[in-house]
Amino acid sequence: MKRLLDYPLSVLYGLWFLLALLIFHPLQMFAYHLFGQRAHQRVVHVLNFFLLHGLYLLGTRLSFSRIQATPTDRPVIFVANHQSMFDIIGMIWYLRANFPVFVSKKELAKGIPSISYNLQKSGAALIDRKDSRQAITEIVRLAKMIEESNFSACIFPEGTRSLKGMKRFSAGGLGALMKKAPSALVVPVAINGTGKLDSYKSFPFRSFQKLSWKTLKPIEPKGKTPEEMAQLAEDQIRAELDDRP
């Protein structure tokens, strides 16, 4: 019975989502060309406010919390588990003070209003999963950018979405970020519930879900290997989600 309700609510949210993308695409272009990258990113933050809070149309409950404040006077590398595309919407809005920029697959940088333009202009690392050399080159470029600008990088070390328990974190991308952004603080982010929202894998979305984002204890990378950092971040997130390997 509940799934029958999911359909009309999903249509309503889908229209809201599409309308927001279409409206904010020219606004992003205007902000970027007239005022530069930071102004463009602030427009992106507002776009994601609407995409995220539009989920109330599905009866979704949203929450964000943090163990301690994240500094804005140094670059930050946010390391998160990955369940759904909605992970990114919440991170962009809730972590906006740190100007989050993502490691993303390159296919998303074409053909999607607002989203593709943001990936092209934000400095996102657009990686080819079949070409490890290209992927590392893109991540290194992103690392250099956040080191110079005090923006933040967001990476999902699982590599792909995981709906049934977390996958092991890979240290490759995180290591490249750490090497070229040596002053960056690493902050794990535990994301919960987003996978259930679109667990039908296509349509409709599941209504009346609870989604949460939580920044965990920051990790200073000095003296630690990328493998150690990946494991420390993974352990914190697993403990928060009660997800045992």
Image (spheres, helix red, strand yellow):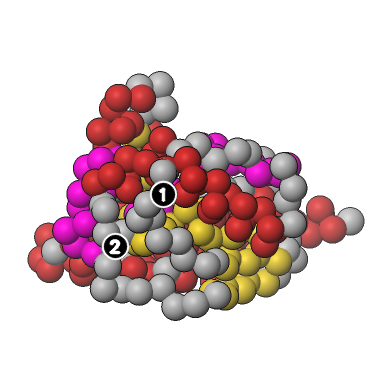
Image side of residue 54 versus residue 138, left or right = right
- Relative to 11, residue 158 above or below: above
Classify the position of the C terminus by image quarter. Answer: top right
In the displayed structure image, the side of residue 78 where residue 27 appears, left or right: left
Residue ID for mark 1: 224
Which residue is rendered at x = 41% and y = 73% of the image? 70
Residue at image location 41% in from the left, 49% down from the top: 224
Q: Residue furthest right?
A: 1
**Disc 1 residue type (three-letter):** Lys
SS for dot 1: loop
Residue identified by numbered label 2: 75
Q: Position of residue 152 (x, y in %)?
A: 32, 60
How many residues crowd mark 2 within 10 Å: few (<14), some (14–19), many (20+)?
many
Element marked by disc 2: loop
Q: Which residues are magenta?
A: 139-166
Judge from the rendering whether residue 136 lies leftward or rightward of residue 159; answer left or right. left
- Residue 234 showing in the rendered view: yes
Residue at the location (50% across, 37% down)? 170
Q: Residue at x 45, y 61 (%)?
A: 219
Q: Is residue 160 magenta?
A: yes
Amino acid bearing label 2:
Pro
- Vertically, is 146 above or below 71? above
Residue 36 painted magenta? no
Tell me where residue 148 appears, x and y as whole percent.
16, 58
